[in-house]
Image (cartoon, grey):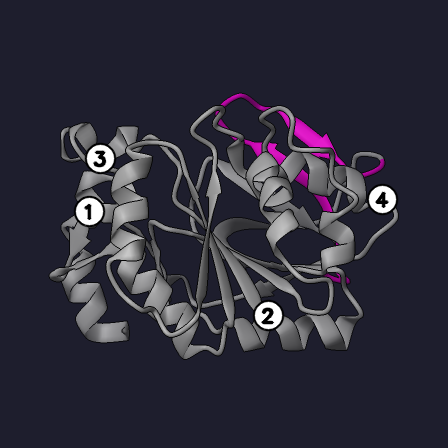
């Protein structure tokens, strides 16, 4: 398996911690977020990891070069233009091989979710992508049919809906957990990375003709440490789940 760690973000929710460093190098439990997630992916058998960089990119590159990670680590440089989640995945695809699925992992996520579980769901359901989700409160929901296929997206703050085809009266709504798995063939169908664009709207377009499923996990076994209040919970979470 191969993976992309999204580490290019500006980390605005963590200011002032990110005034002089990237979010990826903020420490939790005595270890940077980037190191925790790199070691996590390596322990799961990931043989190639791409890390995208933009904000304080040189710090991340120096950190990656400071040790042997036991796996191949490649930098996807976005210093010229921050590409958002969809553009980042498409840009990084140039570094991946076509024979292995591609995991995508937000650097500010802590979770014991196993990529092999996502891959098993992909194989069983003959899907081209699987998104880790949970039943928790959020302002933006992914919507799935009762057979588990991605059918829409809902922003509860603005009231906006995006649909794969036509609006549906019945669906299951879940919060996206920032961990996903894609077939290389599906990623190659995304627009070229010559401009920034988010991932979810592109997945909704692709879902009209390609199967995109979900894997539900326990919401207690997941923590977004990209904001100060949850950063304070990280030590307890690490002790309990990681």
Q: Secondary structure at mark 4?
A: loop
Q: Position of residue 109 (x, y in %)?
A: 36, 54
Vertical comparison of 47 with 206: above or below: below
Disc 3 element: helix
Which residue: 51% across, 72% down? Answer: 47
Give the mark nearer the N terminus: 2 vs 1. Answer: 1
Residue 173 position within the rendered picture, expressed as x and y whole percent measured from the top left: 60, 49
Cα separation between marks 4 and 1: 39 Å
Q: Residue at x 61, y 40 (%)?
A: 91
Please, what secondary structure does the residue beneath circle 1 have? Answer: loop
- Name the residue at 30% across, 45% down: 60
The residue identified by callout 1 is: 26
* Closer to viewer: mark 4 or mark 1: 1
Query: Residue 208, which numbered label?
Result: 4
Q: Residues within 10 Å of mark 2 (few under 14, many from 20)?
A: many
Dot 3 and dot 1 residues touching (CB under 8 Å): yes
Q: CA distance from mark 3 to mark 4?
A: 37 Å
Label 2 with label 4: CB-CB less than 8 Å: no
- Camera-side residue of 79 and 207: 79
Per the rendering, the mark at residue 118 is 2
**Magenta stretch?**
146-165
């Amino acid at each position: 398996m191969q993976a992309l760690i999204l580490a290019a973000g500006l980390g605005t929710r963590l200011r002032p911690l990110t005034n002089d460093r990237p979010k990826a190098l903020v420490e939790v439990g005595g270890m940077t977020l980037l190191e925790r997630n790199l070691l996590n992916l390596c322990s799961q058998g990931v043989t190639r990891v791409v890390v995208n960089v933009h904000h304080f990119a040189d710090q991340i590159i120096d950190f990656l070069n400071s040790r042997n990670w036991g796996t191949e680590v490649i930098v996807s440089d976005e210093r010229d233009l921050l590409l958002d989640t969809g553009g980042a995945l498409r840009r990084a695809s140039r570094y991946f091989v076509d024979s292995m699925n591609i995991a995508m992992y937000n650097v500010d996520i802590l979770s014991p979710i196993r990529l092999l579980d996502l891959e098993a769901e992909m194989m069983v359901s003959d899907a081209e992508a699987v998104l880790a989700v949970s039943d928790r409160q959020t302002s933006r929901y992914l919507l799935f049919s009762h057979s588990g296929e991605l059918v829409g997206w809902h922003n509860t703050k603005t009231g906006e809906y995006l649909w794969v085809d036509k609006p549906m009266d019945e669906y299951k709504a879940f919060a996206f957990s920032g961990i996903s798995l894609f077939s290389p063939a599906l990623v190659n169908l995304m627009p070229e990375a010559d401009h920034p664009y988010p991932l979810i709207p592109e997945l909704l377009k692709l879902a009209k003709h390609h199967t995109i499923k979900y894997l539900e996990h326990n919401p207690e076994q997941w923590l977004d440490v990209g904001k100060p209040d949850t950063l304070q919970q990280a030590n307890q979470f690490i002790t309990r789940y990681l």
